[in-house]
Amino acid sequence: MNAEVDVELREQIRKLCARYPSEYWQKCDRARVYPEKFVQELTDAGYLACLIPEQYGGAGLGIREAAVILEEIHRSGGNAAACHAQMYTMGTLLRHGSPEQKERWLTGIASGALRLQAFAVTEPDAGSDTASISTFAERKGDRYIVNGKKIFISRMQHSDLMVLLARTTPRADVEKRTQGLSVFVVDLRDAGDSVHVQPVDTMINHETNAVFFDDLEVPAENRIGEEGNGFSYILGGMNAERILLASESIGDASFFIDRCKRYANERVIFDRPIGQNQGIQFPIAGAYIRAQGAIAVRDRAVALYDAGEPCGAEANMSKFLASEVAWEAANVAMDTFGGYGMAEEFGIERKFREARLYLVAPVANNLVLSYVGQHVLGLPRSF
Ligand SMILES: Cc1cc2nc3c(=O)[nH]c(=O)nc-3n(C[C@H](O)[C@H](O)[C@H](O)COP(=O)(O)OP(=O)(O)OC[C@H]3O[C@@H](n4cnc5c(N)ncnc54)[C@H](O)[C@@H]3O)c2cc1C
C-alpha cells in the first residue's frame, strides 16, 4: 500500500468516526452499553474484514491497513476494543483451519453475519502462564466435552463464535507443558446452559466475563488444526494482536496530545496560554517525542509482519512502547486540563481509564520485558 492510499484510508476512517463524537462514547460509557451502532457501521463498511482474503469476501489487506483503521478510531476519541477482535481472531482459522472450516465460517465473518470476537485463553489460576490452563476438552467419539472456567473473556455477549484454547491431554502425560493444548471454534448459539457467562464489571465500558463450561459439547470437526498443537497456533496470532493493540495505544496517545495542544493554546491563566509554561509544554512535547518512537517501532513490526518475516521482538516492543506512551500522555492530559480533566464532558477521564488497560492486556508489560530479556538479549529466563 503506498502512502497516498494510507492517507485516503485515514481520511475515510476519520469521516466515519466524526459521526461518533465524544458525546456518543460518553453516553455508552455512562450507561455501560455496547457501542452497537458504531460497530455495525464499521462492519457494514467492511473495515473489520480487512484482513480476510478476497475469496471469502474480505478486503484482503495487510496488517498495515488494519493498524491504520484502529489507530484512527482511537485518535478520534473512540474505542475499538468493542470489536477489534473481529479483525484478527479469525487469523487462527485462516492460518490453521481446513478448507471446509474456512468455507463454513470465513464468509459469514467477512460479511458480519457471524461475529467471531470472543477469544478464550485466560484462566483465573493460570493468568499470564497460559501453558498452565486447566480447562479440559475430553474426546468422546465425534465430539469433545469441555469443562473448566475462563476469566476476562471479552465480547462473549456480542459474539456468535468463540475461539477456545483448552487442554486435550493431561499435563502429566506430555513432555513439554506447551504440548497437549488444542484450539476449537465454539458456536455460542448452540451452547445453551453448558456455557455460563458472568459479567465482570471493570473501570471501563468493556464487556468482559467469567465463563464456566459445564459439559459443553463441541463437534470434533470444530477443532482447528492438529490436536495438541493449539499453543503454537495461539502464539502465532499474538504478533498481529500486539501490533494492532499497539496501534490503538498510539491512537490514544495522539488523542491526548491533540487535545493537550489545543487546550494548552486556548486556556489563558495569569494572562498567558498555559502552554507557554514549560511545566505544561515540555511534558506534552516529551510525550509527542516518545509517541514518534513507538510509531517507528510499530511501523517496523508492521513491515516485517506484512513481508512474512519474524517480528516477535518488534511486535512485543511496539506494544510495550505504545501502551507506556499512551499512559504517559493520559497523565500529561490530566495535568494539562487541570480540574477539567476529571469532568466527564471533556472525555479525558474516560480515555485515561481506557488507556490504562493496555499496560496489562493482552499481555502484561512485565511479560514483554521478560520476553525481550530472554529472547532478544540472551539473558537467563527470569522465572
Ligand atoms: C478488560 C480485560 C479484557 C480482557 N480480555 C481478554 C480476552 O478477551 N481473552 C482472554 O483470554 N484474556 C483477556 N484478558 C486477560 C488478560 O490477557 C490478562 O489479564 C493478562 O494476560 C494478565 O493476566 P492476569 O490478569 O492473570 O495477571 P497475572 O498473570 O496474575 O499477573 C499479575 C501481575 O504480575 C506480573 N507477573 C506475573 N508473572 C510475572 C513474571 N514471571 N515476571 C514478572 N512479572 C510477572 C504481571 O506482569 C502483572 O503485573 C483481559 C483482561 C482485561 C483486564
Image (cartoon, rainbow, N blue to C red):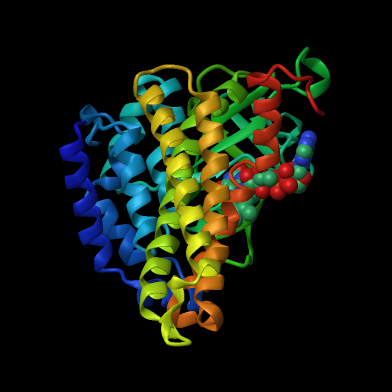
The residue sitting at 35% across, 19% down in the picture is 307
Q: Residue at x 46, y 29 (%)?
A: 92
Ligand 1 found in image quarter = top right
161 horizontally vs 64: left or right: right
Count of numbered marks: 0
Location of residue 116 in the rendering, given as x and y in whole percent from the top left corner: 42, 44
**Location of the N terminus (image quadrant):** top left
Depth check: give the residue in front, 233 or 277.
277
In the rendered image, which quarter contains the C terminus?
Answer: top right
Residue farthest bottom in this picture: 270
* Rendering coords of residue 271 (x, y %): 42, 87
Q: Is residue 107 above or below residue 199?
A: above
**Residue at x-position 71% and y-position 37%:** 135
Against 264, is 300 above or below?
Answer: above
The residue depicted at 46 percent of the width and 48 percent of the height is 289
Residue 160 visible to an observer of this rendering: no
State the residue in front, 237 or 146: 237
Q: Is residue 57 left or right of residue 197?
A: left
Q: Is residue 311 visible?
A: yes
Rendered view: 10 above or below 170: below
* Foreground residue among 256 and 100: 256
Where residue 44 appears, as percent x and y from the top left, is: 23, 53
The image shows residue 185, relative to residue 124, as above or below, that is above
Q: Quadrant of residue 26?
A: bottom left
Q: Quadrant of residue 371?
A: top right
